[in-house]
Amino acid sequence: MKDTLLAVDVGVRTGLALYGFDGKLIWYRSHNFGKSSRLRRGVPVILAEIPDMVWVVLEGSGTLAEVWVREAEKRHLNVRQVPAEVWRKHFFYPREQRSAVLAKRHADEMARKVIDWSGAPRPTSLRHDAAEAILVGLWGVLDVGWLKEMPPPLKR
């Protein structure tokens, strides 16, 4: 596997999405740590399991995000944090973000398009944290230059 980028929707219930150097989604999942102490123990395990990782892109801030940042920096990984408002404006019209429910629905729809475009396995169900991690990752691969532009099936 060549260079990879891990996108994380930070929280006790965490969304994860791994992208390859070609800008395509490799896998995605949701992980419920249950409490912050389990997250602190789990982050090193997750990062250790991913080969060839060079980027970690996080949506989130605060103490839980700091756990990810510290562990990524220990491994000499590039880290970028992005607020939801920043990545969402790249993918959604303002009317699609008027409420949390609306934003989550549009995130789900677009994440499914990313899954299809990437050829990743289709979900039986897609949790909103995994859907958001997929989009954070798409923003990340565009931001770091692994994709030069939005893939045609995802353009608006």
Image (cartoon, grey):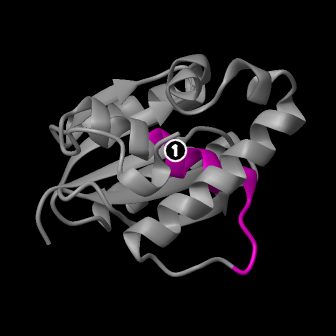
- x, y percentage for residue 135? 52, 44
Q: Is residue 78 above or below residue 42?
A: above
How many numbered marks does the figure carry?
1
Locate the N terminus by quadrant: bottom left
Q: Which image quadrant for residue 30?
A: bottom right
Q: Secondary structure at mark 1?
A: helix
Residue drawn at point x = 51 percent, y = 29 percent: 65
Give 51 or 33, whichever is nearer the viewer: 51
- x, y percentage for residue 12? 69, 44
Q: Is residue 32 left or right of residue 141?
A: right
The region drawn magenta spans: 124-136
Q: Is residue 80 left or right of residue 127?
A: left
Instruction: Tell me the amino acid under the disc marked 1.
Output: Leu
Q: Is residue 130 left or right of residue 47?
A: right
Residue drawn at point x = 30 percent, y = 37 percent: 142
Mainly helix, strand or loop, the magenta region? helix
Give 83 or 93, whichever is nearer the viewer: 93
The residue under label 1 is 135
Q: Residue furthest left?
A: 2
Residue drawn at point x = 84 percent, y = 21 percent: 98
- x, y percentage for residue 53? 21, 54
Q: Is residue 13 visible?
A: no
Q: Is residue 10 above or below residue 43?
A: above
Q: Is residue 58 magenta?
A: no
- x, y percentage for residue 10? 58, 38
